[in-house]
Image: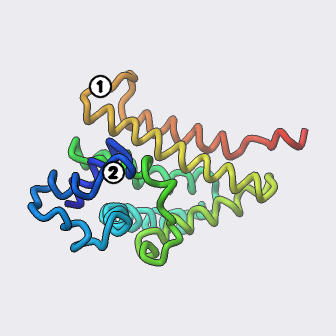
Amino acid sequence: MIEVAERMFAERGIDGVSMRDVAAAAGQKNNSAVRYHFGGRDGLVLEVFRRRMKEINSSRAAYLAQLDENGRGHDVRGLVEAVVLPLADFLRTSGAESYYAQFIARVSPSVDILNPDLSEVTEASREVTTRLMRALDHLPRRVAIVRVDLMLNMAVSALAVFEQRRNCGNPVVDADFDEIVRHLIDMSVGALGAPDSTED
């Protein structure tokens, strides 16, 4: 049911999918299967998020540790890499059966990553965000908060578009995946480093 829900939420959004639809698509004869196993829609959404984020969070934590070893633990580029590369690596190896980046792009406005139920799979992400906020000391704090949020959404959305195109067999852009990821990191670093135009 979790894999089916990931695909359906990715394609249609949370509000476009009934729990009856998920149960039926997963071959469950009991229409209350989602409620029985996950306590309802919110529980299922959290479980889909948690399932793959556990691996990505572990990879992100290892990347942060490597940055610290190399003295780059508070470097903006290094921190952007820590955001992008673990998810990109997951997509690189997941094949056309993954809808996870699309799922995150669709549901992230509805998921509270500070939810205690997600703490074990979002710890590294929260640490990266905290460090990015500190690293953007050329910006007022309120501007840094907005910039980091926009960058996170841009990165996830860009990877979701790649995933969707790959799954449909429609690459569109004549660039390989590593090149796309490199451009995404460069653009994110540039956006975070841009001066605040309101101070002109």
Amino acid type for the residue under numbered disc 2: Tyr
Q: Residue at x 57, y 39 (%)?
A: 186
| Neighbour tally class for label 1: few under 14, some 14-19, many 20 plus, Cα within 10 Å | few
- Label 2 sits on residue: 100
- Label 1 sits on residue: 170
Along the line of sight, which residue is nearer the eye, 129 or 32?
A: 32
Q: In which quarter of the image is residue 170?
A: top left
Sooner in the amino-acid sequence: mark 2 or mark 1: 2
Above or below residue 82? Residue 183 is above
Q: Looking at the picture, how far across and down is residue 25, in whole percent?
A: 16, 51
Q: Residue at x 81, y 55 (%)?
A: 140
Along the line of sight, which residue is nearer the eye, 93 or 7?
A: 7
Above or below residue 29? Residue 160 is above
Q: Does 112 sit left or right of 144 as displayed?
A: left
Q: How is the image coloured?
A: rainbow
Q: Looking at the picture, how far across and down is residue 175, in whole percent?
A: 39, 26
| Neighbour tally class for label 2: few under 14, some 14-19, many 20 plus, Cα within 10 Å | many
SS of the residue under disc 1 = loop
Amino acid type for the residue under numbered disc 1: Asn
